[in-house]
Image (tube, grey):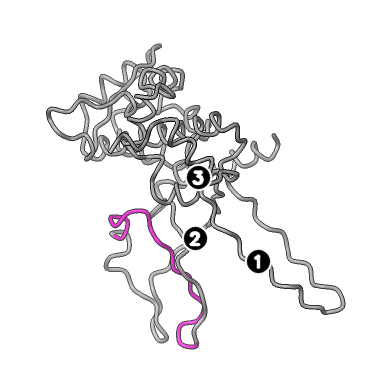
């Protein structure tokens, strides 16, 4: 409990730095090493090609030239989407003996599913609805039980990966009208739109909703921008992906998806009839 409180305080301080941040995202380690010409280096794989815009036109470091400088803070995300505590100092082996090399960690199935965006698949969502394991009506009831996305309490629920913990500051940047709107007393479901459901004839699913205060909801529709529309859609998808993980854990009676096996995964897919949804 004390660790969670400390972690929340740290993340809140980071959120306060939002206006100064060039980029906040989830990335994957692609490579690292050291060369005689350039020194130590690390390469990260970004989540979206658009995030490269932050670096376009910036100076690149070389043997004779200094590149654009950044402050970096890395928080490692575990397979169950929690933050991995930083390791303490490594103890020096006694008697100067070199410890045996550890076996490389096997990539978990949950990590592979997360990397492949399986939890964000509309095909999976449709199968969950049709199998009645987790219907759109069930999801809407859950979303309406949450605080408004503009309230700090919503982000304190930690429903996303660590990268999403910073998103309230970005949400506020897209909503300069917010201070003029007094909160009401009712949470409503705001249906979001993205490239997946942008067609004029397609109605957004109840899987693609976010909780918002009724008065702020009206203001949002009156001041909607492309950036705000895309960002609320991303939040909606993050909420649904979170619930897919919860439903899978509950169905398979797992405390964490890091224990997920291929046999369990196949059983879950059969239970929701995923192969019938192409």
Question: In front: 268, or 221?
Answer: 268
Q: What element carries label 1?
A: loop
Q: What element carries label 2?
A: loop
The residue tagged 3 is 162
Query: What is the number of the mark on residue 59?
Result: none
The mark tally for this picture is: 3
Q: Nearer the viewer, mark 2 or mark 3?
A: 3
The residue tagged 2 is 72
Residue found at x 50% / y 45%? 162
Q: Where is residue 138 in the image (x, y as percent from the top left)?
A: 41, 19
Q: Residue furthest left?
A: 200
Q: How far apart are marks 2 and 1 (CA)?
A: 29 Å
Q: How far apart are marks 2 and 3 (CA)?
A: 15 Å
Q: Position of residue 99 (x, y in %)?
A: 76, 73
Is residue 63 highlighted in magenta? no
The earlier-in-sequence mark between 2 and 3 is 2
């Amino acid at each position: 409990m004390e660790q969670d409180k400390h972690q929340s305080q740290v993340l809140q301080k980071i959120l306060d730095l939002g206006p100064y941040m060039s980029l906040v995202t989830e990335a994957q380690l692609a490579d690292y090493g050291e060369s005689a010409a350039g020194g130590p280096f690390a390469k990260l794989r970004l989540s979206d090609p658009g995030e490269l815009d932050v670096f376009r036109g910036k100076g690149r470091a070389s043997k004779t030239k200094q590149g654009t400088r950044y402050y970096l803070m890395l928080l490692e995300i575990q397979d169950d989407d929690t933050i991995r505590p930083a390791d303490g100092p490594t103890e020096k082996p006694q008697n100067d003996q070199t410890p045996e090399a550890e076996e490389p960690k096997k990539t978990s199935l949950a990590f592979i599913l997360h990397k492949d965006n399986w939890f964000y698949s509309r095909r999976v969502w449709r199968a969950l609805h049709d199998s009645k394991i987790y219907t759109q009506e069930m999801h809407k009831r859950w979303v309406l039980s949450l605080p408004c996305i503009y309230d700090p309490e919503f982000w304190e629920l930690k429903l996303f990966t660590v990268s999403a913990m910073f998103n309230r500051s970005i949400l506020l940047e897209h909503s300069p009208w917010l201070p003029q709107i007094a909160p009401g007393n009712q949470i409503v479901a705001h249906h979001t739109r993205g490239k997946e459901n942008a067609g004029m004839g397609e109605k957004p699913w109840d899987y693609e909703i976010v909780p918002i205060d009724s008065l702020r909801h009206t203001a949002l529709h009156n001041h909607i921008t492309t950036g705000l529309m895309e960002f609320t859609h991303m939040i909606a998808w993050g909420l649904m992906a979170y619930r897919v993980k919860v439903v899978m854990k509950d169905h398979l009676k797992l405390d964490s998806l890091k224990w997920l096996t291929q046999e369990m995964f196949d059983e879950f897919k059969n239970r929701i009839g995923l192969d019938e949804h192409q």
